[in-house]
Image (cartoon, grey):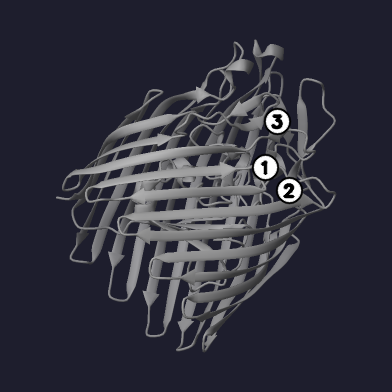
Amino acid sequence: MTAESPAAIAVLDGLELARIPGVNLDDRLRMVPGFSLFRRNSSLVAHPTTQGISLRGIGSSGASRALVLWDGMPINDPFGGWVYWTRVAPEELGRVEISRGASTSLFGDRAMGGAIGLFSREPEPRRITAFYEFGNRNTNVLGGGASHLWRERVALSGHTRAFTTNGYFLVPERARGAVDREANVRFVASAARLDLLGASQRFFFKADTLVEERGNGTPIQRNSTSFGNVGVNYARQFSRDSISAVAFHSRGEFRSGFSTILAGRVRETLSSRQTVPSDAWGGSGYWRHSASNWNLLGGTDLWRVAGQSIDRFPTITRIGEGTQFQHGRFFQADATAGPVRFFLGARHHVPGARRQFFSPSAGVTAGKGAWRGRFTAYRSLRAPTLNELYRDFRQGNAVTQANAQLKPESIFGMETGLDWSGESTRIGMTAFRNDLRDIVTNLTLPSPPAEIMRQRRNAAQALARGAEIEIRQRWREFSGEASYLFVDTRFSSGPRTPQVPKHQGSLQGNWQPGATALSFGVRASAAQFEDDLNRFVLPGYAVAQFSAKRQLWRGLAAQVVLENLLDREFVVGFSPTPLVGAPRLWRAGLRWDGRI
């Protein structure tokens, strides 16, 4: 929670992220209620196209309805909107900020459900990191990094992470057949950054790359990705004004095989092989003026992406392709009058040819002592991705068709909250209402007996209403966090929106007596529906996790982590065969993080 926003913002620093088990960042952010991927699976084995984010129950497909920025640059896939979580090493982040709701007009497309800011660790002189972990299911993680700072003027930093695992079966043992294999992943991700620092200005150049291969549970269903991104940022501070500019370019290619699985899962036949190349570029510029009791920020941004979906069937080849160009202008202002602060913003956004969108936002906060009240209202949008417009998708025998006639989604939302911050206790409570129009969902079509046919369509309307509460408490060496989210999301026609549970919660306890740090956590989710017709129910579940870390010498530490501690089986989807989440996973290893 922050005092500078009329909305609830969750902030996790590097220490908090390190306490939560998980190879990739998405598994750690699940401790924030409302954060989930499509089909509530982990990016450890999930198909990349299902790794879009849902916040507060806004999201019923693989496309993200939240914008993810890494050092100010978007990392949502330009073609599909999903996020390659393997790109980001959680240990190399200084903090993560999660804003649930489009309470600011700074962001345009893909931020209708909120925004997530990832901030890299600041470079330090002569810092070296190196780690190795091994675990069950033939899991191995190896990585390292370094940074150095010369005369407080020039900094260079970088890191690499390599991971491999045999994975686990997506289909429960009672339903497996001869075609089933363990879903697995191998990847190598690297990032490097050069900073030029001055008394009043800063420039950095950043590049990152990803190469990954995945097995999706059968011999034919495999996919691979190669991706690269470069970007620059320049910022300068004057006496009362500051300017900042960001530019980036990304290029990648996604490849996947799809199959039809025969009854009894005894054999599969090739349906198609898909290749999806894409490239994107974009940038933004900001100007900010600060006065004694008011601030004003204005700017502009633009973004262009081009991509293809090349489907090679046994007899034909089909190509779906397109280009998107979006741009916008925005301002955001705030003013203080005694204990009250007012916020006002607006954005004019052009999501494509012959379309325009106006996104206003307004809010107010008022504080007295340890208490703070807040209210905000906003309107935002999300344009359909090239993936939704032109790319068909198959998981098992469930086929989802593209739709080139999709319109942008929109949201009108409001939230109000009350926060209390004491010396060792923090409590935040929020109630919200989000009215979604033309939301893109996977509509079930008349289907053959052995298949499920769906198509991406604009649903008429959906309404999400709910409340959340977060509590943080510290007692000497112990700290604890508890969070709960209730959200009821329904289409105007009555059925509940798929992939959205009514109840989610988490509990995290941390104890650090001296050189030892112990953490225990539980996250739980109520039942949710797989489909728009509410025919397939994914039962509720709860899983526990544990980590222990011991400082051995200076920067050297040993660590053990366990996920799904009690080895609970839980359903994450239907294809129409039930698909299950991760069983008990453990890892142990050594990590060096210190100066030389």
Q: In this picture, is 295 found above or below 211?
A: below
Picture residue at 68% right of the left edge, 54% below the top? 383
Q: Do the residues labelled 1 and 3 touch (CB within 8 Å)?
A: no
Mark 1 or 3, which is nearer the eye? 1
Q: Which amino acid does label 3 sit on?
A: Arg
First in sequence: mark 2 or mark 1? 2
Residue 240 on image: x %, y %: 41, 85
Q: How far apart are marks 1 and 3 (CA)?
A: 30 Å
Q: What residue type is labelled 1?
A: Gln
Mark 2 or 1, which is nearer the eye? 1
First in sequence: mark 1 or mark 3? 3
Q: What residue type is labelled 2?
A: Val
* Depth check, front residue: 17 or 567: 567
Left or right of 238 in this view: 310: right
The quarter of the displayed image where residue 527 is located:
top right
Picture residue at 76% right of the left edge, 28% below the top? 452
* Depth check, front residue: 10 or 596: 10
Q: How far apart are marks 3 and 2 (CA)?
A: 24 Å
Left or right of 72 in this view: 444: right
How many residues crowd around disc 2 within 10 Å: few (fewer than 14), some, or many (20 or more)? many
Disc number at residue 318?
Answer: 3
Q: Name the residue tied to disc 1.
A: 499
Q: In this picture, is 250 found above or below 179?
A: below
Q: Name the residue tied to disc 2.
A: 440
First in sequence: mark 3 or mark 2? 3
Residue 537 on image: x %, y %: 71, 34
How many marks can you see?
Answer: 3
Picture residue at 30% right of the left edge, 55% below the top? 477
Left or right of 285 in this view: 314: right
